[in-house]
Every structure is written in C-alpha cells, then in structure tokens.
C-alpha cells in the first residue's frame, strides 16, 4: 500500500455532523470534504454501515475517505440508526426503516451548500448491500454506486440458506450483530445521554438469529431488499467487485448479466476485503478506479471509464491446499460482455466414480430426451450410494473467508473419504473455467429431508486435493425454496446443485474431482438424521464453464495501478491479538469440535484517547454421527475504556436441535467496570421446516 498525502484538493474533516430523520432521531456522520467546497460545491459520496465510524472502522475509513475527498468529493460516513453515535435502535438487517433513513440522508446531503446536488453510495459488505438496495429505490440525487462483496439475493446467496441449506454463519454473523447493536455510544460525542442511549439499545435488541431462523423458506422477509426480485429497479450505473475467496463470489456476474444500466465488474482472488486491501493478493489500485468512476458519473468527466471489457477477473493458477495464501498466482483476464460468448458450458457424464469425456451435442440431446424430470421416473443406470459421517466438513473453512485466522479449506482427501467421488483421467492439456459449475443429479434418498454438498477440487499428481469451489442443496428445495416438499424415500428425483462462481486453471497432469457428501458440518447445519443418497450414473452430469485457453486475455498483464490510500490514523496496541482455528477429536467419546478465536486485543485510538477491545469466540461440536448433537456457539466481548469510563458488552448465543426443532439459548450482559448493570436471557424454540 502506497500512502499519499499530496492530493489535488486540500480537505477538512467534521467529526460529528448530526443528520435529522423525520421521526426526530438524529444520525451521526463524519464528513471529509475539500476546503474549497465552502464556495464551490462538490458531489457527495455516502458510506452507510453499522460498524462504528469513531473507532472500529476509523483506521480503514481514514485510508479511503480522505483520499476520495482529496480528489474533489464530500465523503460522508454515517452510523446506522442505533449504532455508534447515532440515536435509536438497530433490531435487524436491511429493514424498511434503514433504507428510508438512507434516502433521508441522501436528500439531506443533496441540499447542503457544499454539495452540488449529485450523490453516490459506496461500501463493502453491509455498505454495498445498502448502496444496491437504495439504488433500487431510485432516490432522485443518486447518480451511481460502487459496491464490493455483496449479494442481490438475501436468502440463497448470503450467510443464511445456501441452496436451501442453513449455513453456520447464520448463527455466527447473527452473533456478530447481536454484539455490535448493543454497544454504547461515546460520551465524548453524545455527552451524559450515553447511558440512556445505551440502555435503550440493550432493552430493545434481541438475538438476531431468531428472526433469521424463523424464516427458513424464501418469503417476503427475504424478498424485501433482494434486488434479484426486480433488477430493472436499479437505474443508476454500478461498479461491482468481489473476490473468489469471499462468500459473495456470485453476485457480480449476476448483476452484469441482468442489469440494464452502465455497469462494470471486477473479481480478484480476495477474501472479504476491499480490493486495495485484498488478501490473498495481488491487491490493486482500487481507489484510483473508484475516483475515475465518480469523476465520470458524478462530475461528467469524459475519461473513458466505460471503455474496455465489462468484466475483469483473476484467473487463478493451481496451488497446493492451504488454509491461507499471501498471494494467489494467476493472471488478469477479461470478458467484453457477460454472459460471455467465449465461455462454453461443457457437460461431462458421471459414471462409476469417473467424470467421463465431454458429451457432444448429439449425445447431450439424447441424454436430455431420455431424462424424465417427474418424481418417480426410472431413467435406468446403476445407483451409487453415500451416507456421509458428520466429520465431512471439518476442513471446509468459512463460508466467507476473512483470511484471519486462516479460514480457507484444507486438503480435501480426508473429506473425500466420507464422500462419493468422481474424477477425470489426468488432463492432457490445460483446462480453464470461468463462471458457475453445476451438477445435475438423478438421485434418491431414504429420508424425507436430505442435503448434498458438491465440491470441485484440483487434484495434483501427488494426490493433494485443493477445493476450487462448492455448492449446497437441501433436496427438499430442489424445485422451490419457497415451497419445499418432503422427499419420498426411494423415489427418484432430478436436482441441480449450483456451485459458486470461480476462475480456475487446471494444469496438464492434474485431475478434476467432484465430491458429493450428505453432510458438510459445521459449514452447513446437518439434516435431522443421516440419509442414504443414491446417485444414478448415465443420467447425472457435471457442467463446467470452459474458457478456451487460446482465447486472448483481453487486458494488459498489469491493468491496475499500485494500491493507494491516505495515511491511516495512529493506534497503539495495548494487548496482543489472538487468532486460532482448531479442529479437535476425542476418540473416547467420539466428540468432535471446531474452535475459532478472533481476538483483536485491546487497541488505543490515539486521536480520541479510547481503548477498544473485541473478542469473538465460535465453537461447533458434535458427537459421532448423531446429527441431533450438532451445537453451535457464538460469544462476543466488546470493551470501551477511557479514563474512568469502562464499559463492556458480553453476548452469547447457543444453537442446538433435535429432529423436529431448533433451540436458541442466549444471554446479553452489560457492564460498567466490574458491575453488571444489565442482564437478559432468551430460551426459544423454533420448529424445523424440512431443514
């Protein structure tokens, strides 16, 4: 990262600007803008998130908001209602109130004397969700958005219900927000009202996992704010990015294929990070790209930002399996449009433990003609069976990698021991794929509820297996996530498993492996009981999005500048951080455990004299192959200390189950010093809904 201070515009900063909402609540904003904007108004760019601008995101914010402001923009970082130093309560994600507040903020910005009436929105993760969702509401001043690591489908392509199967991140991320939404404002900003504001949050916020768990089907709760419900609602230009190691690797290409506005896509090898902070590397000069985007769409500069390909992406080369990479070898490639006419869906038949040679057009047509999609159809072929142990999934990594602690999938050979495996012969030549593979299965199960996890791996000549991509399917939702249907034991069905998008090269001599399992714990919550899955050869296929290796890359070898940003705020570490990811097995009682520690230690923010500590602890356990023994826990401690002010919040959420119900046990405790000043407990039961 190159830090720059000599920018085109001198800037000034306003730390706490109050923005009034229609109901009297005031949101707290931090504003960076050119000093010249007092007399020469500029466009305004909004980042709108719940992660505390005064402390927790202040270092990151100091690297990019002053940078963009120094190129002639008013950059505005707003704490959502009920977070940081804003008033009110945050009860859940992406509610109508949140989006109405965002529209009010944009309208307020457009009316300020230092704003020329044009606005944009940008962000990563929640900030990107907010920008895209607000864009679909078409506020009059919003001219363009820049979004990173996001989705357009809240139910199936977020942390909740991938392929209709519940992710453990449904619990983990709920635990994160349970903690963030109950933190106090800073008395140095809000004064003596801090305690009243804090207790309002404590008293009106509950475990976020409860509403997420009560909506196991795709319903109006999830359709709200899912832009995939109506892509045509977005009427402003979109610059969208993500990373192949992120959980949000699919939405960029979906937006490129479905929006009807000027749009560009960028996908690197990164985890859940901004591209200029991208890990694994290479990171890129993302802020330069963002400034060019704003210059064109907010200032009308004819800078050619829409020239060139629609999609630029990192084609990843083969690597040995590892839970973390500093850099991913590969190269930049480009597609002028998306879907790309250069990429061909190539179907491979699944025979007995083999991925066969590609089906030609005639054979493909015959296979389609022979396949009967009605339940109960007998399409012939021999059945191959698998009933996976709960241990399959212990090396799956996180749904969305944060690269700290190391959280990518490890060598898949142990996972594959409990899976149904199909494999190609050693490749005679290099194979490259770009897009989302799919697996079409002719299958049957012996239980009314069953899942399948499909994993695609790159197998080197020495046998090491690096997972390339994966997908999940709760088979009861094979036709509809809105109206699932119990399976008839022994009845044959056709089901499609969509794998996450990826750009990956397989070298000559390597094999492509497809692995199917009936559990993937703890990445995904297991079904109520083990199921025996039968997969029928001859009518089951793997489809790969093949990009010809002789196709031009379409971009220079180094199409981006070096990462830049303004110098970060000064912080001093008070206590050391701790990061652990441990898999444990007890061979006496067959107890298995995954323990994750993400402890940021205590950090002193020099500018405001504040110590802040964050510690997250996750624990996932099970016993032998008792699917009802699955247990997940998320525990957070958040601490804020300055002089004689010492406050902390402790949250704990525990999720267990039996065959018919989920059980949520949660606690929330607030402390001033060592004195507990607030405590509440929840014990709730939520029925399982074919899950």
Image (spheres, rainbow, N blue to C red):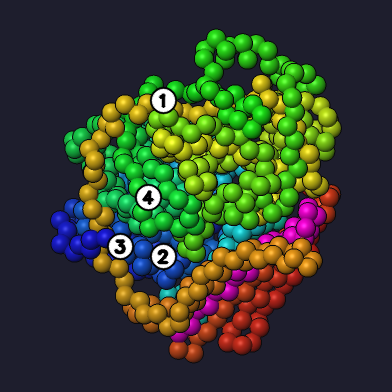
Q: Which residues are magenta?
A: 617-642
- Per the image, the residue denoted by label 2 is 57
Read off the residue under disc 4.
328
Work out whether mark 2 precedes mark 4 in sequence or the reverse, and give the earlier one.
2
Q: How far from the left and from the top, in percent, is residue 672?
A: 59, 84
- The disc, 4 or 3, on the residue closer to the chain's N-terminal end is 3
Picture coordinates of residue 400, whole percent (x, y)? 52, 52
Residue 63 is marked as: 3
Badge 3 marks a residue whose secondary structure is: helix
Nearer mark to the viewer, of 1 and 3: 1
| Residue 303 included in the magenta stretch of the image | no
The picture quadrant where one finds residue 450 is top right
Determine whether the residue tagged by mark 1 lies in a helix, strand or loop.
loop
Tell me the residue that label 1 is attached to.
343
Residue 45 or 155: which is nearer the viewer? 155
> Residue sitting at 36 percent across and 41 percent down?
314
How far is disc 1 from disc 3 in space, using C-alphas?
38 Å
What SS does tag 2 mark?
Answer: loop
Placement of the N terminus among the 4 image quadrants: bottom left
Q: Is 623 a magenta residue?
A: yes
Q: CA distance from mark 4 to mark 3?
A: 24 Å
């Amino acid at each position: 990262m190159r830090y720059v201070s000599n920018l085109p515009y001198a800037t000034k900063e306003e730390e706490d600007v109050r923005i009034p909402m229609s109901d009297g609540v005031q949101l707290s904003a931090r504003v960076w803008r050119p000093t010249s904007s007092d007399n020469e108004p500029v466009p305004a760019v909004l980042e709108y998130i719940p992660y505390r601008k005064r402390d927790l995101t202040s270092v990151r914010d100091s690297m990019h908001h002053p940078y963009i402001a120094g190129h002639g923009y008013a950059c505005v970082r707003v704490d959502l209602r009920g977070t940081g130093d804003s008033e009110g309560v945050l009860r859940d994600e992406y509610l109508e109130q949140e989006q109405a507040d965002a529209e009010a903020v944009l309208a307020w910005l457009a009316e300020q004397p230092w704003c020329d009436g044009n606005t944009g929105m940008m962000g990563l993760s929640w900030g990107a969700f907010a920008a895209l969702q607000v864009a679909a509401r078409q506020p009059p001043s919003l001219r363009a958005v820049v979004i990173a690591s996001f989705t357009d489908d809240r139910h199936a392509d977020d942390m909740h219900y991938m392929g209709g199967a519940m992710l453990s991140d449904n619990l983990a991320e709920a635990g994160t927000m349970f903690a963030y939404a109950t933190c106090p404002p800073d008395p140095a900003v809000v004064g003596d009202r801090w305690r009243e504001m804090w207790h309002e949050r404590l008293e009106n916020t509950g475990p976020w996992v409860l509403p997420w768990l009560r909506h196991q089907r795709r319903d109006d709760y999830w359709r709200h704010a899912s832009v995939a419900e109506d892509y045509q609602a977005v009427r402003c230009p979109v610059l969208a990015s993500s990373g192949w190691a992120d959980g949000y690797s699919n939405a960029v290409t979906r937006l490129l294929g479905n929006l009807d506005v000027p749009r560009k896509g960028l996908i690197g090898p990164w985890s859940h990070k901004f591209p200029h902070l991208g890990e694994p590397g290479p990171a890129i000069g993302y802020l330069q790209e963002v400034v060019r985007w704003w210059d064109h769409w907010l200032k009308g500069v004819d800078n050619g930002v829409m020239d060139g390909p629609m999609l630029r992406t990192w084609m990843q080369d083969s690597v040995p399996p590892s839970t973390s990479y500093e850099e991913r070898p590969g190269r930049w490639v480009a597609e002028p449009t998306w879907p790309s006419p250069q990429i061909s869906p190539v179907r491979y038949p699944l025979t007995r433990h083999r991925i066969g040679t590609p089906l030609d057009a005639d054979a493909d047509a015959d296979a389609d003609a022979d396949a009967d999609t009605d339940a109960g159809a007998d399409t012939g072929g021999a059945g191959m069976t698998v009933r996976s142990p709960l241990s399959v999934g212990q090396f799956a990594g996180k749904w969305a990698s944060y690269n700290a602690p190391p959280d990518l999938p490890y060598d898949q050979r142990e996972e594959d021991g409990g899976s149904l495996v199909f494999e190609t012969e050693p490749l005679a030549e290099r194979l490259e794929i770009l897009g989302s593979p799919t697996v079409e299965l002719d299958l049957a199960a012996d239980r009314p509820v069953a899942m399948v996890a499909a994993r695609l791996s790159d197998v080197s000549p020495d046998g090491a297996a690096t997972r390339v991509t994966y997908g999940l399917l709760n088979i009861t939702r094979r036709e509809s996530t809105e109206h699932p249907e119990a399976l008839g034991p022994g009845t044959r069905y056709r089901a499609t498993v969509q794998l996450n998008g990826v750009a990956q090269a397989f070298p000559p001599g390597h094999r492509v492996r497809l692995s199917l399992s009936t559990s993937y714990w703890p990445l995904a919550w297991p079904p109520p009981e083990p199921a025996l899955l039968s997969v029928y050869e001859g009518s089951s296929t793997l489809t790969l999005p093949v990009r010809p290796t002789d196709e031009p890359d379409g971009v220079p070898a180094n199409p981006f500048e070096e990462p830049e940003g303004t110098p970060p705020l000064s912080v001093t570490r008070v206590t050391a951080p701790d990061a652990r990811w441990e898999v444990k097995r007890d061979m006496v009682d067959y107890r298995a455990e995954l323990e994750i520690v993400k402890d940021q230690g205590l950090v002193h923010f020099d500018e405001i004299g504040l110590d802040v500590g964050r510690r997250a602890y996750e624990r996932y356990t099970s016993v032998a192959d008792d699917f009802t023994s699955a247990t997940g826990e998320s525990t957070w401690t958040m601490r804020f200390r300055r002089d004689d002010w010492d406050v902390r919040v402790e949250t704990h959420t525990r999720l267990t189950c039996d065959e018919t119900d989920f059980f949520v046990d949660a606690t929330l405790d607030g402390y001033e010093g060592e004195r507990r000043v607030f405590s509440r407990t929840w014990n709730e039961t939520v029925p399982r809904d074919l899950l």
